[in-house]
Image (spheres, grey):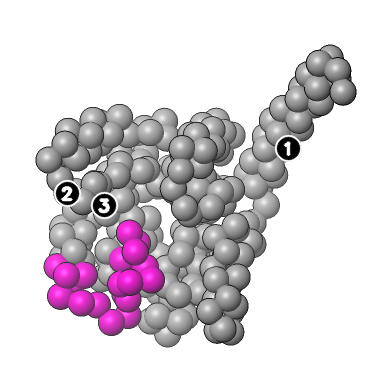
Amino acid sequence: MNLRKLLRILRNLILFFFISTVTTVIVYRFAPVYITPLMVIRSVQQIVKGESPAWHHKWVPFDRISPHLPMAVIASEDNRFATHNGFDFIEIKKATKENETRKRKRGASTISQQTAKNVFLWPQSSWVRKGLEVYFTWLIELFWSKERIMKVYLNSIEMGKGIYGAEAAAKYKFHTTATKFSAGQCALIAATLPNPIRFDSAHPSPYILKRQGQILRLMKLVPKFPPEEKKKDK
């Protein structure tokens, strides 16, 4: 195989990658996200362990999710979600400085970045995944509204073992619906998001209860999301 042919193949692969990824992002601007790589990976992991795969997920419109939940995740995960362009450089700078002396490193991943990872990529961290995460974050910030990013995030994020999205968490954690979530329940869910397998929002530890209180206080301070004029489901 000569060099010219190799270059042509490489060019075609690069074109295919960009066309397919941009098309997928545009489709998900309008279509529900019913399946993510993490859902598949977790099911495979359960089968490998000899367990029956648990997969609870139901997509619901944004107006069927308690308005407390976006406020809770913004307060907990990404205070500047409504104003940044996908990357919170203030938090990145702070985390970089803190990590110089911290034994346990902390990240500065935004809700946009977490959505990009959840919907398009895999959980294990690597330089390749980080690079793709930056790329997909840029794409969704370009093609989606902030409301759409939040809607996809709340419908797809892992909230417990085999539990994905607000409606499934409401049913299997609190025996209610996402519409009826209280502020306290939303704060509990947000408190467990860094590790929803280890921490159970339905049976919170003292640490999670402490985090719940902190998040409830922050929820009163962060700007309302979505703004009053943007409450329509997008």
Using the rendered view, name the quadrant where residue 6 is placed.
Answer: top right
Distance from label 3 to label 1 (Cα)?
A: 34 Å
Q: Earlier in the sequence, mark 2 or mark 1?
A: 1
Q: Nearer the viewer, residue 91 or 146?
A: 91
Neighbour tally class for label 3: few under 14, some 14-19, many 20 plus, Cα within 10 Å: many
Mark 3 near mark 1, Cβ–Cβ under 8 Å?
Answer: no
Amino acid of disc 1:
Ser
Q: Residue at x 30, y 29 (%)?
A: 89
Q: Nearer the viewer, mark 3 or mark 1?
A: 1
Amino acid of disc 2:
Lys
Residue under circle 1?
A: 20
**Residue 8: where, in percent of width, then height?**
82, 20
- Tally of numbered discs: 3
Using the rendered view, name the quadrant where residue 217 is placed.
Answer: bottom left
Residue under circle 2?
A: 103
Q: Nearer the viewer, residue 126 or 71?
A: 126
Distance from label 2 to label 1 (Cα)?
A: 40 Å
**Magenta segment includes 209:** yes
**Residue 128: where, in percent of width, then height?**
52, 38
Q: Is residue 36 above or below residue 189?
A: above
Q: Residue at x 55, y 60 (%)?
A: 38
Q: Nearer the viewer, residue 174 or 38?
A: 38
Q: Where's the N terminus, which quadrant? A: top right
Q: Which mark is residue 71?
A: none
Secondary structure type for disc 3: helix
Secondary structure type for disc 2: loop
Residue under circle 3?
A: 75
